[in-house]
Amino acid sequence: MEIINRRQRMSSVARKVRREQDQTIGLVPTMGALHEGHLSLVREARRMCDIVVVSVFVNPTQFGPSEDFSNYPRDLTKDTALLTDYNVDFIFAPTVEEIYPKNFSTYVTVEGLSEQLEGVARPGHFRGVATVVAILFNLIRPDFAFFGQKDAQQAVIVRRMVRDLAFDAEIVVMPTVREESGLALSSRNAYLNDEERHAASVIYRALKRAKEAHKGGERSGSRIAGIVRATIETEPRARIDYISVADADTLERLEKMDDRAILVSIAVTIGDTRLIDNTILNRAKQKEAVTTQV
Ligand code: AMP
């Protein structure tokens, strides 16, 4: 395994792999502080591709001015040890200056999708995400890139960008990995104390109730959202930011739920930590089907 810090080295290594060795490249973009959620993506990349590149880059352009960019957990030594165990070929861990050279001024904006849901509380977040993913795709030219359903809106936006800008990469979205309590694994869970962590399990319970209600025949978006809200409100430590019931491909909010794939997504703050989670209803109908399931 090689750790690469320079963009030039990254692109020349990737070019060599593609052209001279005719091997497929899988890219797993991460911000590090790796957990089992990230590792499920790495495992799938290892299974599907000849060469696996994991990028570890805490991307400043996707953080708002009052967000946790400087405090975000970073531990490249531990991440490197984990990725060695997973037989990863390259870790791309560039500095901020390497990704954003002096006078950097070109951004990718996926209009319409980026201003909704997470985009309301985090303006500019998805512009930062789309821009860094575009840079990584251009440097590495992956055949496959792996993302988590945990960040559902991110996956929708990356897919749209790939289609619109004709990137030659296939996007693979993997299911959310959870703790036994149901809490979705996230690097930001490190901010939760024991009570908050316990309280956070209400998020998954609420999503499960939505799923059960839908299975039982409920087809009203607002009533499904109401069920989620009522469950979250049983937990006094949780403050709801949004609950959305929307078309899983367009993110357009739905009242009458038909047989389209539907994304039920939630953002909740517990203590000082903002957590997001989601579930898909009618998954089999999802237009841009989830490529692989664990
Ligand atoms: P991050 O380091 O938070 O930017 O996440 C890197 C990738 O890992 C993203 O595609 C996330 O959606 C994915 N990911 C994060 N948490 C999970 C999880 N609990 N289950 C599955 N994928 C995850």
Image (spheres, rainbow, N blue to C red):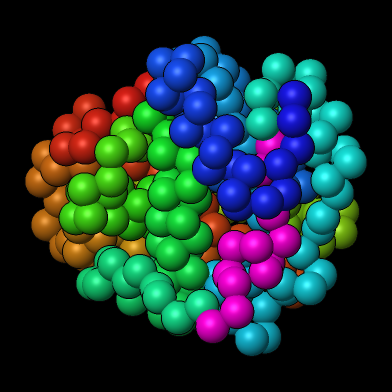
Q: Is residue 85 above or below residue 243?
A: above
Q: What residue is drawn where x is 81% and y is 70%?
A: 71
Q: What residue is drawn where x is 41% and y is 61%?
A: 130
For residue 114, side relative to residue 282 (left or right): right
Residue 96 part of the magenta-drawn span: yes
**Residue 174 position in % (x across, y down):** 46, 32
Residue 159 at least partly seen: yes
Q: Is residue 159 above or below residue 38?
A: below
Q: Is residue 12 above or below residue 197?
A: above
Which of these two is toward me, 52 or 12? 12
For residue 32, side relative to residue 29 (left or right): right
Which of these two is toward me, 65 or 23? 23
**Residue 84 position in % (x across, y down):** 79, 23
Residue 58 part of the magenta-drawn span: no
**Residue 186 position in % (x across, y down):** 67, 49
- Residues drawn in magenta: 91-103
For residue 166, side relative to residue 98 (left or right): left
In which quarter of the view is residue 43 placed? top right
Q: What residue is drawn where x is 28% and y is 46%?
A: 167
Which image quadrant: the N terminus?
Answer: top right
In which quarter of the view is residue 38 placed? top right
Residue 231 at least partly seen: no
Q: What residue is drawn where x is 12% and y is 39%?
A: 259
Which of these two is toward me, 95 or 84? 95
For residue 21, side relative to residue 143 (left or right): right
Which of these two is toward me, 148 or 92? 92
